[in-house]
Image (tube, rainbow, N blue to C red):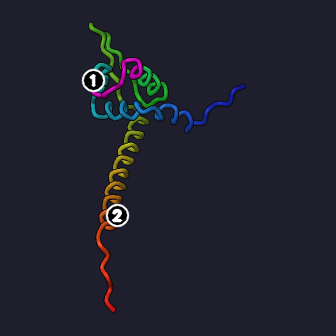
């Protein structure tokens, strides 16, 4: 009998793909239709986008809404858990900016000539 994956391992499977974070952030920004997502996310193929949308929906991070109209229309929205994850992603991006700023400051300090102390 195969062991079931932990919740963390399942989350890693879903968001470990380089495209998942881009999809989540685009939906958070209001880009919610597959065609618009494909145009917005540079380099993603239709096949990969469809697979990411399926996985993110199955994991409960996105909700799929199908409208019965002609032509058919499908939209995606963040679920409460999707909103939480996007909030965490935004915090990580802020931290990355702070780290880069700190690294720049440290490099500038290291590049400054040292003053000689006089006895």
The residue pinned by badge 2 equals: 106
The residue sitting at 41% across, 18% down in the picture is: 47
Q: Residues within 10 Å of mark 2 (few under 14, many from 20)?
A: few
Residue 2 in the image: x percent, y percent?
Answer: 69, 27
Q: Residues within 10 Å of mark 1 (few under 14, many from 20)?
A: few
The residue sitting at 34% across, 67% down in the picture is: 110
Quadrant position of residue 67: top left
Q: Does the stretch in magenta take in 44?
A: yes
Image quarter hosting the N terminus? top right
Q: Which mark is residue 86?
A: none
Q: Earlier in the sequence, mark 1 or mark 2?
A: 1
Depth check: give the residue in front, 116 or 1. Answer: 116
Depth check: give the residue in front, 85 or 95. Answer: 95
- Most extreme residue toward the bottom is 119
Image quarter hosting the C terminus? bottom left
The residue pinned by badge 1 equals: 39
What's the magenta region?
Answer: 39-50
The residue sitting at 33% across, 17% down in the picture is: 74
Residue 50 in the image: x percent, y percent?
Answer: 40, 19
Q: CA distance from mark 1 to mark 2?
A: 39 Å
Q: Nearer the viewer, mark 1 or mark 2?
A: 2
The residue sitting at 35% across, 28% down in the picture is: 77
Q: Is 112 left or right of 21, judged from the image as shown?
A: left
Q: Is 7 left or right of 65, judged from the image as shown?
A: right
Tell me whether circle 1 and circle 2 mark residues in contact (CB < 8 Å): no
Residue 30 in the image: x percent, y percent?
Answer: 27, 30
Quadrant position of residue 57: top left
């Amino acid at each position: 009998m195969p062991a079931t994956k932990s919740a963390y391992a399942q989350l890693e499977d879903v968001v470990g793909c380089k495209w998942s974070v881009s999809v989540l952030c685009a939906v958070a920004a209001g880009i919610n239709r597959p065609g618009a997502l494909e145009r917005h996310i540079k380099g993603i193929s239709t096949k990969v986008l469809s697979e990411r949308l399926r996985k993110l929906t199955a994991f409960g991070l996105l909700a799929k809404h199908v409208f019965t109209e002609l032509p058919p229309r499908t939209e995606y929205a963040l679920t409460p858990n999707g909103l939480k994850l996007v909030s965490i992603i935004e915090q990580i991006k802020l931290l990355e900016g702070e780290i880069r700023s700190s690294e720049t400051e440290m490099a500038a300090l290291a590049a400054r000539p040292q003053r000689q102390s006089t006895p």
